[in-house]
Every structure is written in C-alpha cells, then in structure tokens.
C-alpha cells in the first residue's frame, strides 16, 4: 500500500491516516485511496472505510469531492471574525459591535485599586461575588463556582482541555460560531455537527451526536451566531431531557450576548448534569479588547480549570477584572448597554423590513448580525455585491457539514445609516434578481 495504512476499525484506520498526514507522508491535495480499494486491501467492510474518512472530514483533515475522491485538506485557517484586511470595500461582514457604543473605561480604570502580587487569589473577590449572582440563573442547585478566563474562546479551550483527549468528539451547532469551530479543530478534537433551526439546537441532532459518542456539547442558548436563533423554553426542556441520560458529558453553554440579548435565557444544563459550564464574555458590550469572560461551573470542573490558571503565569489581570466590575456595576454604563441593545435590535429590524419589502423575506433573530437566506447561490451574490462596493460574508464559512450548507449571507448592518442600509438592500435585491434564473431549486430554511 502506497502510504502503509493499517487498522481494522474506523477509528484505527482514521488514526493511521491522521498520523501519515501529520508526518507529511500525505500532503495537502493528495488523494486518499478509493474506498473500495482500501477496504479490499485491509480486509474490512466498505462502510468501515467510509466511516474512517468521515471521521477525518469532521476533524477538518480531508475534504470529500464527490467523483474527485477524498483528498487531504489544505492548511487554510478557519475564517475569523473582524474586519477584512486590505480592502477598499464597505465591510458588512465583520461581526463587530459598534465602537461608538462601547463604554469609555478611563474613569473606571482610575479606580482599579492596589497592585496584586504573586500568591493572591486568581479571581478578584468583588468580581466573584457579583458574578456568582449574575451567572446563577437556571443553573443546578447550589452556588456555582466562578472562574475568570481571557475571553470565551480561552474558556472553551481550557474547558475542553481539562476534560477531553485529542480526537475525542465534541458536538457543535451547525452552522457554527467561527471561534468555537476554530478552537475545536486546533485542539485536535473531532467536531460532530448538530443542526440548528429557528428554536436553536435540534433535539434529533443532539441525540444523534450523543449516540456518536461526543464527550462535550457546546450550545448557544440565545443569539446563536450566525443564525440569531434562541432556545425556546420547550426546546431547552427537550434538550435537558436528552442530556439527562448522559450526566457525565461536559455541557458548555456559551451565553455570549448576555446583557445585550432581547431573548430570555433558557438553559440546557439540568439538575442531574455532573459536568457543566456557562460562559459569559464581556466582549460584545465592553469591547473585544477587554479579553475577559466569566465561567460558572460545577465544583470539579472549576477545580480543574483553577489548575490551568496559576498565579504568576496564566491568571487574568486583576486590573481587567476590577475594570470589568467597575463598568458593569456603574448605572450609567448599564444604561448605555441597554441603549446599545436597543440600537442593534432596531437597526436589524429596519434592515430586515427593507429586504422583505424588496422581495427577500427575512425573520430577525437576536444578536449583532443578520442571517439572510437567499434564493440564489450565495457565492455569486457575494461576488456581485463586491462589484457594487460591498464586502459580505457568505454562509459557507459557518457550516461543518457541506451537505447541510444552504445559500446564506451573514450581514453586520447596525453601523449603516438609513441611506446606506437602503443602498445595500437595493444592491442585494438587484444581485439576487440578476441570478434568479440560475438559482438552485429551493432554499434551506434555518
């Protein structure tokens, strides 16, 4: 065999191929052996090889190309949030909050307090006391343990690292928040997609992922990025019921939009869940550069996290912690956060109404962005909009499963004034109209 693949089970075959990819014996673009040929060579069922290739695809190591076979994936990084570099186009795909609505920290910074030295607690006592009350809603009985990390992505990375081993399976929403997808793939875990609909993570999708052996589940309870979906009370209860049969699976709830959300919080963390964590970053309302998230979790998870947040090496700056506390407890700042939440909702609602009036109906979810379904190929719409001066982000970046992907744009429009929003809506409607004759039949509703 050209690349000396071994194994009898899907996981063994996948591990053998993964080793050869990592050692450079298989390069980006190289074709894997045809399924039937490899099954014959190894003396296994054809479906075993299919399952092995699927494991590699879920880990982002290979790409299935239909009649072109399965090939080793390139090393292009997972797409990230933020402004695109080096473009003169108007960027409406950033996922950023409005900088004008981020509170000025100068006055609060002046009250940041005394220096903190080695050996002191890693969590500021004042922030911990405030956060315990802030985070407790809907969590299992008893006061949650509080940990502070350098943002939500850092929290997810640490939570997975303290509970999982490389190649363990993690359930991710599909489409997925880019940062979570990046963190899972960079950690060497196997991403298992769970479909999302208008009420959030689907029950059948979660049940299938648990049957596939996932060791952790990452769920966005509201303002799902990119779709804007929020869990209903009924859906959250159904998901808790499914998870109740898997009490030792780590359930991570990423409530990233917390203080800005216009949807109620319905948690998937039930009373019987033994391993759980809720993450709330401050980046959407205090600014991405704050790099701070609060984690509420069960005792064992908190103790394991504490081992990875050692004083003198990896704790989160107490200046940042005290600054966060000073801001979120300032009535004027909280009033400003409320105004920001209203602004994002108002601008999204207005743009959705403008698109609907132009024949592109759009139901608004929650969050900074809009998830726009298209009756035409998204990639071609994106290219047309570039010629019209707009830089948008199509939905393909957010899907784990190519077969689940539909034609969508994710737009960040809250910084556009009325005239600019009308211009974008006109251009988007014109781009779709020009492509309708070549549009694929139907569209996938999210």
Image (cartoon, rainbow, N blue to C red):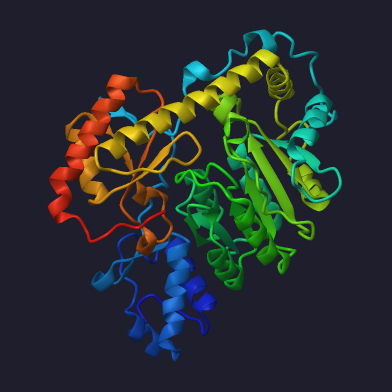
Residue at horizontal 17 percent and vertical 34 percent from the top:
387
User: In the rendering, at what x and y percent does residue 388 appear?
Assistant: 18, 31
Task: Tell me if residue 296 comes above or below residue 336 in the rendering.
Answer: below
Most foreground residue, 372 or 47: 372
Most foreground residue, 75 or 265: 265
Residue at horizontal 80 percent and vertical 27 percent from the top:
124
Residue at horizontal 28 percent and vertical 33 percent from the top:
391
Give left or right: position of 229 versus 109: left
Most foreground residue, 51 or 76: 51
Most foreground residue, 390 or 213: 390
Q: Quadrant of the N terminus?
A: bottom left
Task: Tell me if residue 164 comes above or below residue 420 in the rendering.
Answer: below
Residue 133 seen from this side: yes
User: In the rendering, at what x and y percent does residue 267 appear?
Assistant: 67, 49
The quadrant in which residue 80 appears is top left
Task: Tell me if residue 415 comes above or below residue 34 in the rendering.
Answer: above
Residue 23 seen from this side: no
View extreme (front): residue: 357
User: In the rendering, at what x and y percent does residue 378 appear?
Assistant: 26, 48
Number of on-image labels = 0
């Amino acid at each position: 065999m050209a690349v000396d693949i071994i194994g009898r089970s899907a996981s063994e075959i996948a591990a053998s191929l993964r080793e050869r990819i990592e050692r450079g014996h298989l390069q980006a673009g190289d074709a894997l052996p045809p399924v039937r040929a490899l099954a014959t060579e190894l003396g296994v069922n054809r479906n075993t090889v299919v399952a092995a290739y699927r494991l590699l695809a879920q880990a982002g190591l290979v790409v299935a190309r239909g009649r072109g076979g399965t090939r080793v994936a390139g090393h292009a990084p997972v797409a990230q949030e933020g402004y695109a570099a080096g473009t003169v186009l108007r960027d409406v795909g950033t996922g950023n909050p409005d900088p004008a609505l981020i509170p000025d920290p100068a006055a609060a910074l002046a009250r940041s307090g005394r220096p903190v030295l080695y050996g002191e607690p890693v969590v500021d006592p004042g922030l911990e006391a405030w956060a315990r009350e802030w985070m407790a809603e809907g969590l299992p009985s008893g006061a949650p343990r509080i940990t502070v990390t350098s943002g939500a992505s850092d929290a997810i990375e640490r939570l997975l690292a303290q509970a999982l081993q490389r190649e363990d399976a993690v359930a991710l929403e599909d489409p997925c928040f880019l940062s979570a997808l990046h963190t899972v793939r960079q950690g060497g875990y196997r991403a298992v997609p769970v479909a999302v609909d208008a009420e959030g993570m689907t029950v059948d999708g979660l049940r299938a992922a648990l049957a596939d052996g996932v060791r952790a589940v990452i769920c966005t309870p509201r303002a799902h990025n990119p779709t804007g979906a929020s869990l209903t009370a009924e859906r959250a209860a159904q998901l808790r019921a499914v998870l109740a049969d898997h009490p030792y699976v780590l359930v991570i709830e990423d409530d990233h939009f917390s203080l800005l959300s216009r949807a109620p919080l319905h948690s998937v963390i039930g009373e019987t869940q033994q391993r759980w964590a809720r993450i709330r970053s401050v980046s959407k309302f205090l600014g991405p550069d704050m790099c701070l998230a609060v984690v509420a979790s069960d005792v064992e998870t908190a103790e394991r996290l504490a081992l990875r947040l050692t004083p003198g090496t990896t704790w989160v700056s107490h200046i940042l912690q005290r600054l966060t506390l000073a801001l979120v407890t300032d009535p004027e700042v909280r009033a400003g956060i409320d105004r920001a939440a209203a602004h994002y909702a108002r601008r999204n609602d207005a743009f959705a109404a403008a698109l609907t009036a132009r024949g592109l109906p759009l139901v608004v979810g929650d969050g900074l962005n809009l998830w726009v379904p298209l009756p035409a190929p998204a990639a071609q719409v994106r290219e047309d909009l570039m010629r019209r001066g707009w830089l948008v982000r199509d939905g393909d970046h957010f899907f784990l499963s190519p077969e689940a992907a539909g034609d969508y744009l994710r737009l960040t429009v809250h910084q556009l004034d009325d005239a600019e929003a009308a211009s974008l809506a006109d251009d988007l409607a014109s781009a779709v109209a020009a492509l309708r004759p070549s549009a694929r039949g139907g569209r996938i509703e999210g």
